[in-house]
Image: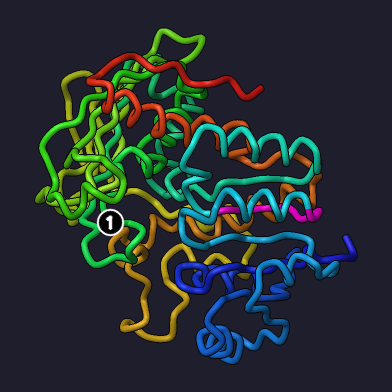
Amino acid sequence: MNKKIRVAIVGLGFGSEFIPIYQNHPFAEMYAICQRTPDKLNEIGDHFGIEVRYSSFEEMLKDDSIDAVHINSPIPNHAEQSIAALMAGKHVACTVPMATTVDECKRIVEAQQQSEKNYMMMETCVYTREFLYVKDLRDAGKLGRIQFLRGAHQQEMAGWPGYWEGLPPMHYATHAVSPLLALADKEADFVSCLGSGQISDELTMKYGSPFAVESALFKLRESELAMEVTRSLFETSREYVESFDVYADKMSFEWQQLEGESPVIFTGEIAERVDIPDYAHLLPEGIRKFTTEGVYDSAENVHLSFKQGSGHGGSHPHLAHEFIMSIVEKRASFPDVYTSANWTCAGICAHESAMRNGEQVKLPKFR
């Protein structure tokens, strides 16, 4: 291949984590950055040596040199920016969640179909070393027949940017939903979810969501499987966790209770803790180091999501590699637009169910 994929990154908080990954990828060119704040834009541009800089997203999309756009903007902007970039003829990678309404997800799917460009939701939890380890067990037949799956994402979001305040827990559920559906290789079909507890009136008033915790049961489409997902964002004491458990007939996997521990494998009734290997060997040599280290120049500059999430399990270079190679190889990415929409709508529909006191809600079909 002669031409490298020219990438533009939008949003330079968490988004800066990906700049050196694209700079060191053999098939990518880290071409442009976009940030509304000029001081931040120039600080990052100078630090990483990126000359093409935009403070306007709309102006950036007019640049015909850009092949792909990686969106790391605030959640409320994800849908409109993804649609605009696709319709401008750009491949799109977007941080989670894809959108905040079912209609927005439908519009993104339609934009992808019309543009015929790749869309990939950059879900960290299906590229962590823990996920890749359990996927290997599944693919080797060591798990056997999966019987049930459980996921949780509990995080205290106090002090994050204002749009997070009072966000319904399940509107940001993809970290807990995605590894379960990916390991089952199925889509969510319908959900019944209950809200529990109560957050402060100040937090409730922004989105009209009163619950401290939302816990959902999903039935998987064209499958005998069900899964359970629990999510909390505010006023619930718990060490940060993004976890998944898989119960199968030959072997089961349970996430550790505390971050400093190791996960547990059960073979029958025999339990043992396991050390999870790194999967950098799956990546081009130039980006392997980013599975175990961040890209900021000092500990003080580490983005809060990276710090709280323990580096997101080494997933960032795997995500960037999958996005770039899906374009190079002219294939759909994993997740593709349809899978991204199902994973996102799982949480949206779960919150809808919680607001209806557990009423069953059917997820839309996108393909």
Side (left or right) of 116 relative to 245: right
Q: Does residue 26 show up?
A: no
Up-down relation of residue 88 to residue 117 (above or below): below
Up-down relation of residue 285 to residue 39 (above or below): above
Side (left or right) of 130 relative to 80: left
Q: Nearer the viewer, residue 293 or 350?
A: 350
Visual colour scheme: rainbow
Residue stretch in magenta: 88-94
Q: Nearer the viewer, residue 178 or 37?
A: 37
Position in image of residue 245 (x %, y %)? 28, 31
Q: Nearer the viewer, residue 321 or 178?
A: 178
The amino acid sitting under disc 1 is: Glu
Up-down relation of residue 304 to residue 142 (above or below): below
Label 1 SS? loop
Q: Does residue 280 show up?
A: yes
Measuring 75% from the left and 65% from the top, which residue is drawn there? 61
Label 1 Cα neighbours within 10 Å, binned few <14 / some 14-19 / many ≥20: some
Instruction: Tell me if residue 89 is in the magenta stretch.
Output: yes
- Looking at the rendering, in which quadrant would you find the C terminus? top right
Q: Residue furthest front?
A: 205
Measuring 51% from the left and 9% from the top, which residue is drawn there? 222
Q: Nearer the viewer, residue 304 or 172?
A: 172
Up-down relation of residue 137 to residue 145 (above or below): below
- Looking at the rendering, in which quadrant would you find the N terminus? bottom right
Side (left or right) of 156 relative to 226: left
Position in image of residue 126 (x %, y %)? 47, 42
Q: Identify the residue under disc 1.
A: 165
Position in image of residue 109 (x %, y %)? 66, 35
